[in-house]
Amino acid sequence: MANLSALSKKMILVIAVLAAVICLGGLVFFRSAEAVPFALGAVAASAANVLKLMLLERMVRKIAVSEGKYPVHWVYVQYFLRFALTAGVLLLAGWLSFTALIGAAFGVFTLPLSGFAMKFFPDTM
C-alpha cells in the first residue's frame, strides 16, 4: 500500500468507513444472527473494491509512464478483471445466502461513493 497515491489512500479510508456504516446498519436492521452474513457480504465487496482501486491505479500509472505505447488490449483486460472480481464477489455472496448477497450489493457501492466523497472532501482527510 506504500506505492499508492494520497487520493487512493483517502478513498480506501472512505471505503472502510462506508463498509463499517453498512455493517452497523445491517446490525440495526436485522438484530439477529442474519446480520453476520450481511456484514460478510459487505466486507467482501468492500475488500474487492479496494483491490479494484489498486488495479485501476496500477493501470493508470503504467499508461502514464508508457507515453502512448501501452497496448489498448491491456486496458480491456484490466476492465474485465475488475468486472469479473465484482461478479465473483456477488456470485459467492449469492451462493452463501440471500442476506449476504444484499450486503454485497450494498458493499459494491462503496467505491463509487468514495469517489463521490472525494469531490466534496478533497483536502480534509
Image: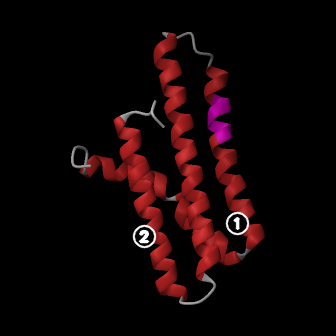
Q: Decide: is 80 above or below 35.
A: above
Q: Please tell me which residue is depicted at 67% across the width and 38% down the height of the picture.
A: 80
Q: Position of residue 68 (x, y in %)?
A: 51, 11
Q: Please tell me which residue is depicted at 25% across the width and 50% down the height of the picture.
A: 121
Q: Decide: is 71 above or below 55.
A: above
In terms of secondary structure, what is the magenta stretch mainly? helix
Is residue 113 visible to us here?
no
Q: In front: 58, or 106?
A: 58
Q: In front: 43, or 85?
A: 43
Tell me which colouring the rendered structure shows: secondary structure
Q: Please tell me which residue is depicted at 48% across the width and 64% down the height of the picture.
A: 19
- Which residue is situated farthest in the front direction here? 2
- Which residue is situated farthest in the bottom direction here? 31
Identified by mark 1, the residue type is Ala
Q: Earlier in the sequence, mark 1 or mark 2?
A: 2
The answer to which quarter of the image holds residue 88 is bottom right
Range shown magenta:
76-81
Q: In front: 103, or 32?
A: 32
The answer to which quarter of the image holds residue 81 is top right
Identify the residue position indicated by label 1 in the image: 93
Is residue 52 visible to us here?
yes
Residue 80 is a magenta residue: yes
Q: Position of residue 14 (x, y in %)?
A: 39, 55
Identified by mark 2, the residue type is Val
Q: Position of residue 111 (x, y in %)?
A: 47, 52
Q: Decide: is 61 above or below 21.
A: above
Identify the residue position indicated by label 2 in the image: 21
Total labels: the figure holds 2
